[in-house]
Image (cartoon, rainbow, N blue to C red):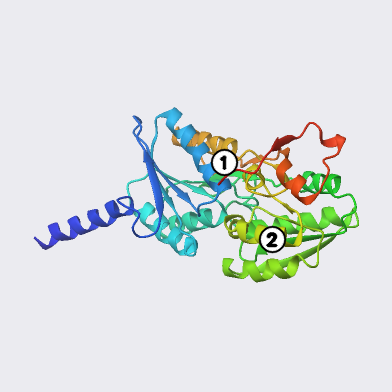
Amino acid sequence: MKKLLSVLLSALLLVSLFAGCSSGGAEGSGSGSSAHKVAILQYMTHSSLDNCTQGVKNALDAAGIAYDVQIGSSGSADADCQSYAAQMVAGDYDMIIAVATPAALAAYSAVQSASSTIPVIFCAVSDPVSAGLVQSMDAPGNNCTGTADSFDVAGQVDIIKQLQPDLTKLGVIYTTSESNSLSQLERLKAQCATLGITVVERGITEASELASVSASLVSEVDAITNLTDNNVVENMSVVLEQANAAGIPVYGSEIEQVKKGCLASASIDYVALGERTGQIAVDVLGGQSAATYPVVTVEDSFKVVNTDVASQLGITIPDSMSDVQKVTTSAE
């Protein structure tokens, strides 16, 4: 009887992972006819990561592969992902697909701690080598591979200079614990240095610091640009509120941020990135080794500008940008 009770309790623990949202995580699932079942771990909810996960789901749906999704909650995403990842490793899953660097680190750590052979496929990890997820981009070496989103720093600075040719000081807010942000910041500083632009950087440790940091930064710069920093992107409205009050443009790191009030961006298609990640997952489930599957880096970007925001800021879109994608501010 005691043994039976123990088995039942263990089963209930695993079922509870995907049984409801009351503990704080958002979730979903997809049914498929294949024998495989995949767990998707998304770091937190914001437009870039939501689009990544949608792309992953598109690819898995097309392949008939079943999946469950867990998403970290605002304010506790790191702890949530660590907990979810451990439970995913203990569950009956053939693979974990992790969206964003912190989620990938949580999944990889959980697999390593359990000495598990479950492959981890990551999505939107800007620098997987520095993050310690792979040994190299061409030969991961570990049972872990996926896609890297290479933020188009040169394209971003180019669009900023076209819209603000007299800009000399560019502000950046980043989370000090996000390795992707640190590597992007260094690339941004190097690019700006060639053009005589001073990067004014402000690091934060948690989202609650954004209001005060933004309020201070807008008085020191000509514009602010986002990186693919999860904390900043999730709480972008806080930055926009301070910047709009000061008449300072904010440049997004992808199109969804531009639709929500940023001026412009050199944007990656994150749905397409997710779909490519999902295809890697399908390949690995089909027998290819994650340890030898090269990381796929998506570098292509497209330029997008919000005409509503440009008008509000009194910025004229030059003829040189006549072919860029134009959007207006969404009602969201």
Write the residue at 69% across / 46% down: 150
Q: Secondary structure at mark 2?
A: helix
- The first of marks 2 and 1 along the sequence is 2
For mark 1, does the 10 Å Cα neighbourhood hold few (<14), some (14 to 19), or many (20 or more) residues? some
The image position of residue 323, as x and y in percent, is 79, 31
Q: Position of residue 91 (x, y in %)?
A: 33, 50
Residue 251, percent from left and from top: 73, 51
Residue 178 or residue 96, whichever sits in front? 178
Amino acid at pointer 1: Thr
Q: Name the residue located 30 percent from the left edge and 50 percent from the top edge.
A: 19
Left or right, 286 with respect to 232, comes to left
Q: Residue at x 83, y 46 (%)?
A: 163
Marks counted in the figure total 2
Q: Quadrant of the N terminus?
A: bottom left
Does residue 101 appear to the left or right of 92 in the view shown?
A: right
Residues packed near mark 2 inside 10 Å, few (<14), some (14 to 19) or many (20 plus): some
Q: Which of the two marks, 2 or 1, is nearer to us in this view?
A: 2
Q: Classify mark 1: helix, strand or loop.
A: loop
Residue 76 is left or right of residue 227, and the answer is left
Q: Identify residue type, mark 2.
A: Leu
Q: Kindly identify the residue that appears in the image at 33 percent across and 58 percent down.
A: 22
Residue 233, quarter of picture: bottom right
Residue 10 seen in this snapshot: yes
Residue 165 placed where, x, y %?
A: 89, 49
**Residue that badge 1 annotates:** 292
- Residue 131 seen by the camera: no
Depth order, front residue of 254/101: 254
Q: Are marks 2 and 1 in contact (CB under 8 Å)?
A: no
Task: Check disc 2 and report the residue beneath it.
Answer: 182
C-alpha gap between disc 2 and disc 1: 27 Å
